[in-house]
Amino acid sequence: MNAPSQLESGTVVDREEPLAIGDARGTVVALAAIVLAVCAWCLEATSRGAGEPQPAPVRLRLELNQASVEELMLLPGIGPELAGRIVEHRETEGPFDSLEALDAVHGIGPAKIAGVAPYLTVADEP
């Protein structure tokens, strides 16, 4: 053990031995446990609000045969080029009779159709 030290103010301070490595590990483990407990509490506190009424999600629904390039670009996975090809196909080949008919547009396959299907409708043509 180190000898006591006297501060300039005259106060005598006993200095303890420095922490041993084992003691430092214990401190780190204790701090980690506290951090985990706080994180768990925060997660639990935020999930408590799950039972409260939530606002209804805003749903985008576009009519495929009337949507503009800009509107089609709002759909997931549809950029300006693909939106332009959809409109161009519609103008040259006529209106789509189903969502599956999008498969005729270069760059659109079953996975892309499945991704945009919740956001699109096809009106019955007279």
Image (spheres, rainbow, N blue to C red):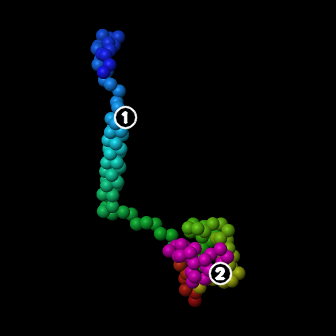
Q: Residue at x 33, y 35 (%)?
A: 23
Foreground of the two, 71 or 21? 21
The magenta segment: 98-120
Q: Is residue 69 magenta?
A: no
Instruction: For the residues labelled 2 and 1, say whether their Cβ atoms are less than 8 Å apart.
Output: no
* SS type, badge 1: helix
Task: For marks 2 and 1, give the one nearer the viewer.
Answer: 1
* SS type, badge 2: helix
Q: Quadrant of residue 30?
A: top left
Q: Quadrant of residue 68?
A: bottom right
Q: Quadrant of residue 76?
A: bottom right
Residue on which disc 1 sits? 21
Rendered view: 33 above or below 84? above
Specify which label sits upstream in the sequence, 2 or 1.
Answer: 1
- Residue 66 visible to an observer of this rendering: no
Picture quarter with the C terminus: bottom right
The spot of residue 83 in percent (x, y) is 64, 71
Q: Residue at x 68, y 78 (%)?
A: 89
Residue 104 is marked as 2
Three-letter amino acid code at the position of disc 2? Ala
Secondary structure mostly seen in the magenta stretch: helix
The spot of residue 81 in percent (x, y) is 67, 68
Rendered view: 64 above or below 18? below
The residue at the far right in this view is: 92
Picture quarter with the N terminus: top left
